[in-house]
Image: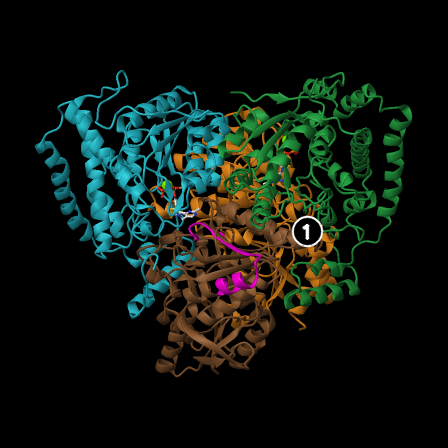
Chain colours: A brown, B cyan, C orange, D green
């Protein structure tokens, strides 16, 4: 198949139907062929191909020096990754679940994020940290958390979260080429559900540009990752039940944030709902509310509503009620009209 | 200098002269039955997962001697900071099957209220501290608890477990270091089953053994045949006594094998040589101990039947009871975040209650790990 | 001296002038005498008495079993602390600078915060983690950061930040007595500057109650820690230069948050400035803005302004320009009137 | 089994038979001069701090042999991932005094643009990677860089440093483990100066030495007299060669002593016995090496004068130059967060610019650490 390149808008790129998993795998293959400084490593990324299969075939194709398993230490994975990046490589480190990143958190916050700044630009850390995040797979609190807010609050890091296979591929390739450390968070709930046309071969999506996932006029919904399809269903409900025309903005990158697109949309609609899976208090959605309340409050015709995970650890049996679902989001949308 | 591998039972089940701990007959039979029950529980757990009745399972098959032999050296008042592959200890400490199985279902019969994935048990009545998924975190906690008990002049001993992969964790390093510096009464058991999911020992560490890592902390390190329950018991008992005497911690490496795949989500055939697996199957710790009992004339067909079939029946009955327990109610989601809920939690609870009343809420949820 | 007990409002408590450092030291002494389960430990807290002197005299007075130095491992300090708390002690763990907490972050986020929840209430973790935070002492990026937002976004933790010596003492004693893990963050910039009457002996301040540091009618300033005195000076400027009557709310505990006091104040004034030292993006102040934008937007007569640290790592030479100062806060206050 | 302490120079400065590395005379003199210069720089740094002209200083006095002897075994193309107590390496790698001293002042002469506290150097031209305060983080980074170089077939060697306190860090554990598993060309130098601020060795670890911790990772561990520059050089050279040959990493423990307080903020008299300090003062590495040079007839009063007074003059001149450099401008705060500033950073830069224009901004800033 062929389709218009979603990034440039021009040309006819060849495409192929892929799941998000396949698109991520494809992105790494493309970049590993393209740049021999790219190495992929982490726990079980070699022969096993990753616990979700995102690194399937890489070890076979590129060998031990380019794709390898590591000892069970996130501290080591990330510390070694920083060293590689400082030395001039393009490390792509996989953290098996985002919940397990904390043993290596120091290397991200204190080292990767600050290397360029603290050395006056002499040393840089172009590393990508890939990790599946979020709920939706019955993983309990240690295989389900969404802690993007921690990283967004850490100057020096970029934070990227795709919601479609094509974006996953394009954003991942752009992240690997980026000169700064990037947290590339993969919404595991839609690893296989998201399935769509993806450009074959070379394909990049610029970091820092949001995507209007759906145009609308009455209310803006800001979301990212696995919440995008949930919000799309909620928008359908809001349309059906109350005739609301919902605009959905898929942020794609949280840092750098595309404030321009956000503010344009909310100024147009005058109403906004912010949706995220993480615990409500202190989540990145609060930052979005705050930006709007600081820069566009005079356009607001209702409260800035947040629909988010609850302020509890991620539960196991009650996961379906913990995560924002279409009904809950639709209720949030309605609240911007009637409160 | 390589560490010797401590063994008592030869492969025919004979104890080496002078090394048999000479446990009383009924205790030997009790241990055997516990091993069989642990295996039976495991088989049932995996079956339930395969039938889609529970969401996840993780087996300890092949490691029964390793965790039962070590925990058996404790007193009931001693504490455990376990990893996730020592279910037999729950049986040793007399937790009823229903309670264990209810945890798999995560329903109202579960002591942890359906909050965790299957096999992440917590049983205060057994001094068995809540299991968490992040590898290794229990090791430094055990050190801290040991430091506290010692400072207070109590004689509790703390036993904590990790895998071979766990030796690479931050907490292995600081946990062993703290325990040694403060001479805390802790026994660290590293169950070396050869694999950390798909990563074999030689990619985990270049050290000649896990036990030798004890040198780095100035504590004794012992390597023991983990499929030999008497040997495991014997070395652990010494370590427990040393700890209780105030002479500090020990690292014990039990050399064993993960017979099953890592968990219900894993397929070991993708990365593991069949031959290795088959060789280890021949070293089954239950069969080995059975041969010993036979030598000692403590084994009979009837006894075997009681241990295997009898246990299976009990487990089957317990599954029925556990599965029939009502689900946890939505309101329980907001409990136990703090001792007393914050205003925010109260508001959120009410919000969810209202949504549930209106109907139609509930996110789609897939399977682990897809 | 004697004064009315600020907590109960009744009785005449004996008081003494103390710096915040002394008040914190006093709180530990009181509680260690009071409860033999309380132990204080960390790097250099023993003979040296802590790098700031907060633990001065404890080792001498209570001995090795109650106050002791540890190896250089925050992971060990916090992991051991969790184990002690689970076993029934009341550990008070000191992290020398908040910037150095990350090697032990996993024990806080994955363990302390979730122990009660994941065990269905069977095991609890009543640990206090004390750490100096914030800028103001020429410490560069590794002795100056304010990362309270990470902890506020972690359900299961409480987060307490005093701004006066009396509060420091009362809140610390309450934190030690609390049944849940508490991050007790000490604004090192005012360790010695804050000097005031502090009740002698027994003194508690309830967690979760904000303090009106100054009453006013035109605009509300929300702040905590070392920003409170800065906001007080800014309020003077705003009064002098533009005749603004500023109400200052000192949050005292960020989790649990006293939303009631915040919302009452902003509904009264109709204008609000949120002040914090941490990098602006993703800081806890964004959460405050979001709460107001969700629950009281209809009362707002101007933008919800944030004055915060910039989105850079904490600098060394330019620290004085990085941190919010009275002038910058005053400019923020004015912006709620003229924007 | 205790590790032997490798020594070459006896206390009279005589090299043990057959062990003298026989460096050329001019190299021996160069090393001596570097040691003197490192000490002089240190004294000046502390003096500037005491005069209130810089905000912080941290001395390496007494550890000159330890870090100069080890780094001297490298080629200039080899990389360093240092801790904060190896300033002599900058001199060895010919960084001009002004550049080093400008870092203390944190002004526009500083390669890191006044972003870090004094003594947190970064010099790309010297393959000297930016120092950070958090203890140990450089260790796993060095392992990673070594893994990369090895995978690419390059022959760069990586040397990284930590203190005795640093052995307790997470990164010590994973850094050594990773380096050993991948046989990365890394030399880990642990400068054991007896103290981690106020915490002595025996509260840091119960292990019999730091070098023995190498066992835990399956790499060679060497204990060397850290005040004997020839011994340090010799063992390090072997380790560097081993690394370059592809035979993997080594852990070297240099046994030395922190003669000064931890830093300008610390007063060691609060916690440290004067006798211990005095005993170590007698083992001064510079005096010891001087005696060796005297034996070799490579020392004279004139030479001494050049090394000590000459250096002091150069440093004094460099202080003048460095101190006179203009401060960094407010706009530099927003550079180097990313390669290209985000819109948010551009907006914030403009906001600060406007505030500065209006005048009166600037927070009150105290002293470190009060
Ligand atoms: C910190 C952390 N990283 C990664 C994981 C994912 N994970 C779960 S089990 C496992 C392997 C553990 O191996 P080992 O310690 O040998 O224990 P075993 O499963 O063999 O009993 C991994 C990598 C985890 N649970 N925690
Ligand atoms: C992770 C971390 N924790 C605490 C500190 C505070 N700190 C700075 S230096 C130091 C002691 C370091 O001792 P050692 O490793 O022996 O090095 P030395 O100073 O003796 O050279 C401490 C605790 C820090 N910088 N980083
Ligand atoms: Mg294993
Ligand atoms: Mg030291």
Magenta highlight on residue A44: yes
Magenta highlight on residue A319: no
> Viewer-proximal residue, B111 or C258?
B111
Looking at the image, residue B266 lies above or below residue A194: above
Disc 1 secondary structure class: helix
Image quarter hosting the N terminus of chain C:
top right
Ligand 2 - quadrant of the structure image: top right
Q: Which residues are magenta?
A: A27-46
Looking at the image, residue C12 lies above or below residue D342: above
Q: Is residue C252 left or right of residue D118?
A: left
Q: Chain of mark 1?
A: A
Crowd around label 1: few <14 · some 14–19 · many ≥20 (10 Å): many
Q: Residue at coordinates 46% horizontally, 80% vertically from top-left?
A: A2
Looking at the image, residue D232 lies above or below residue C143: above
Q: Which residue is mark 1?
A: A118
Where's residue C34, x and y in %?
48, 31
């Amino acid at each position: 198949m062929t389709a218009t390149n979603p990034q440039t808008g021009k040309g006819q790129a060849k495409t192929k139907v892929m799941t998000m998993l396949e698109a991520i795998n494809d992105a790494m293959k493309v970049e590993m062929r393209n740049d021999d400084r790219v190495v992929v490593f982490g726990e079980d990324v070699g022969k096993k191909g990753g616990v979700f299969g995102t690194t399937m075939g890489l070890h076979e194709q590129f060998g031990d020096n380019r794709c390898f398993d590591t000892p069970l230490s996130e501290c080591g994975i990330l510390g070694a990754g920083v060293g590689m990046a400082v030395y001039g490589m393009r490390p792509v480190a996989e953290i098996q679940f985002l919940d397990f990143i904390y043993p290596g958190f120091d290397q991200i916050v204190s080292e990767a994020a600050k290397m360029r700044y603290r050395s006056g630009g002499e040393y840089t850390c172009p590393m990508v940290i890939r990790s599946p995040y979020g709920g939706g797979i019955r993983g309990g609190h240690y295989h389900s958390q969404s802690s993007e807010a921690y990283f967004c609050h850490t100057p020096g890091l970029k934070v990227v979260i795709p919601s479609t296979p094509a974006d996953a591929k394009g954003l991942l390739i752009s992240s690997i080429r980026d000169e700064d450390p990037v947290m590339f968070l993969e919404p595991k709930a839609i690893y296989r559900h998201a399935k769509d046309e993806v450009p074959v071969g070379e394909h990049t999506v610029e970091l820092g540009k949001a995507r209007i996932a759906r145009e609308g006029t009455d209310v803006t919904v800001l979301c990212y990752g696995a919440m995008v399809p949930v919000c799309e269903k909620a928008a359908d409900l809001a349309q059906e039940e109350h005739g609301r025309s919902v605009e959905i903005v898929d942020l794609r990158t949280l840092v750098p944030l595309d404030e321009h697109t956000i503010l344009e949309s909310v100024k147009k609609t005058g109403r906004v709902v912010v949706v995220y899976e993480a615990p409500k208090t202190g989540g990145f959605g609060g930052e979005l509310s705050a930006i709007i309340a600081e820069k566009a409050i005079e356009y607001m015709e209702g409260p800035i509503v947040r629909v988010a995970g609850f302020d509890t650890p991620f539960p196991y049996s009650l996961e379906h009620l913990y995560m924002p679902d279409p009904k809950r989001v639709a209720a949030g949308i309605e609240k911007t009209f009637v409160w | 200098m390589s560490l010797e591998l401590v063994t008592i039972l030869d492969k025919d089940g004979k104890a080496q002269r002078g090394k048999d701990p000479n446990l009383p007959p009924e205790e030997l039979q009790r241990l055997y039955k516990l091993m069989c029950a642990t295996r039976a529980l495991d088989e049932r757990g995996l079956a339930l997962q395969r039938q889609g009745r529970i969401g996840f399972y993780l087996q300890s098959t092949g490691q029964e001697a390793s965790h039962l032999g070590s925990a058996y050296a404790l007193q009931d008042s001693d504490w455990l900071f376990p990893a996730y592959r020592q279910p037999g200890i729950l049986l040793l400490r007399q937790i009823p099957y229903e309670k264990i199985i209810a945890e798999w279902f995560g329903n109202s019969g579960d002591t942890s209220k359906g909050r965790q994935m299957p096999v992440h048990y917590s049983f205060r009545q057994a001094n068995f501290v809540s299991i968490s998924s992040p590898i290794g975190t229990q090791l430094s906690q055990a050190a801290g608890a040991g430091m506290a008990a010692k400072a207070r002049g109590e004689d509790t001993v703390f036993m904590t477990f990790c895998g071979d992969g766990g030796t690479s964790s931050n907490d292995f390093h600081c946990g062993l270091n703290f325990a040694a510096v403060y001479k805390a009464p802790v026994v660290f058991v590293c169950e070396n089953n050869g694999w950390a999911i798909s990563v074999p020992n030689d990619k985990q560490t270049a050290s000649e053994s896990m036990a030798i890592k004890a040198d780095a902390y100035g504590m004794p390190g012992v390597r023991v045949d983990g499929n030999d329950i008497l040997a495991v018991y014997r070395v652990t008992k010494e370590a427990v006594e040393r700890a209780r005497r105030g002479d500090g911690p020990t690292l014990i490496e039990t050399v064993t094998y993960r017979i099953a795949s890592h968990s219900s989500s894993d397929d070991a055939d993708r990365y593991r040589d069949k031959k290795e697996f088959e060789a280890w199957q021949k070293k089954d710790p239950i069969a080995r101990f059975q041969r010993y009992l036979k030598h000692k004339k403590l084994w009979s067909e009837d006894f075997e039947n009681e241990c295997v079939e009898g246990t299976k029946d009990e487990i089957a009955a317990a599954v029925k009871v556990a599965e029939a327990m009502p689900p946890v109610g939505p309101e329980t989601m907001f409990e136990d975040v703090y001792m007393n809920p914050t205003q925010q939690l109260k508001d959120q609870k009410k919000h969810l209650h209202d949504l549930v009343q209106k109907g139609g809420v509930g996110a789609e949820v897939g399977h682990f790990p897809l």
